[in-house]
Image (cartoon, rainbow, N blue to C red):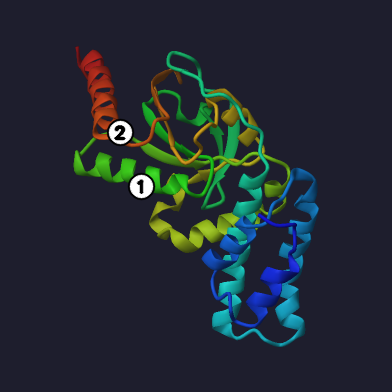
Amino acid sequence: MHHLNLQEPLDLFSTGLIVNNFEIVERLALVEISCSEHSWLLFFVFNLNRYFVERKLILKKLHLVVKTSLVAILLFIMSACSTKYENRQIISELFPSVSGKNLEGVVSNIPKDFSGRKVLFLLGYVQNAQFDIDRWLIGLDMTNTEVEVYELPTIQGMFPRFFETQINQGMRNGIPKSLWKGVITIFDDGETIQEFTGNINPNNARVILLNEKTEILFFDDSGFSVESLNNLRTQINRTISDETG
């Protein structure tokens, strides 16, 4: 680690030595930051695009790199300073009332809009949680598990709210339009949910199955495994048996 120096990644990016969002985030990850230094990072994010525009360095391809890098930097800022909450076991509790917006722009009141039917939420608190979410989605698909599934990127903190539009657009760029309805981003109430479940080991998805009364029937925060998937499927099949019996 070394002292905060935002000019270094900016200079390297401008000379072409840093050419993509992964490299620029790696450089920033080597910078020792505290919550009080977020203003410097935000200054860097706001001025990066203008830096290139003023110097007429942007070609169409480079401009796309800059925009995707901004999304990655914003995600880095979110995870760099966030409140930690101890993990909890929340089975049999009611899911808290929160609101979010799917990638089509439609507001969802959760869990109110899903009452009366079973639904599975896959919550991700940091960007890397997407890897775990993808494993759950693949497992559910390969086993033909019949359940309504929604991804809930859930981000806490004040700063991410300022960039909600840019963050959502970054997600749209990486997700087929046919799936936008099933991705609901939560910004304003991100703190509420993370405190409810706990957010230790944030790379693990929070997997929550709700019944028709919005009670939590299944919860897992240990990361995808065949055993966890089988436990989820057992709970889903049990509720189906109860309904038909």
The quarter of the picture where the N terminus appears is bottom right
Is 110 located above or below residue 70 in the figure?
above
Q: Residue at x 64, y 56 (%)?
A: 74
Rendering coords of residue 227 (x, y %):
25, 29
Task: Say which of 71 and 169 sits in front.
Answer: 71
Indicate the amino acid at tag 1: Asp
Residue 134 tag number: 1
Question: Do we see residue 60 in this rendering?
Answer: yes
Determine which quarter of the picture holds residue 217.
Answer: top left
Residue 26 lies, with reference to residue 194, above or below; the image says: below
The answer to the question of whether label 1 and label 2 lie on touching residues, with beta carbons closer than 8 A, is: no
Q: CA distance from mark 1 to mark 2?
A: 16 Å
Q: The residue tagged with tag 1: helix, strand or loop?
A: helix
Q: Residue drawn 27% across and 18% down? A: 239
Q: Is residue 96 visible?
A: no
Image position, residue 12 (x, y; %) = 65, 76
Q: Amino acid at mark 2?
A: Val
Q: Nearer the viewer, residue 128 or 174?
A: 128
Label 2: which residue? 147
User: Where's residue 238, x and y in %?
Assistant: 24, 18
Depth-wise, is mark 1 or mark 2 nearer the camera?
A: 1
SS category of the residue bearing label 2: loop
* Residue 95 on image: x %, y %: 51, 22
Quarter of the figure that contains the C terminus: top left
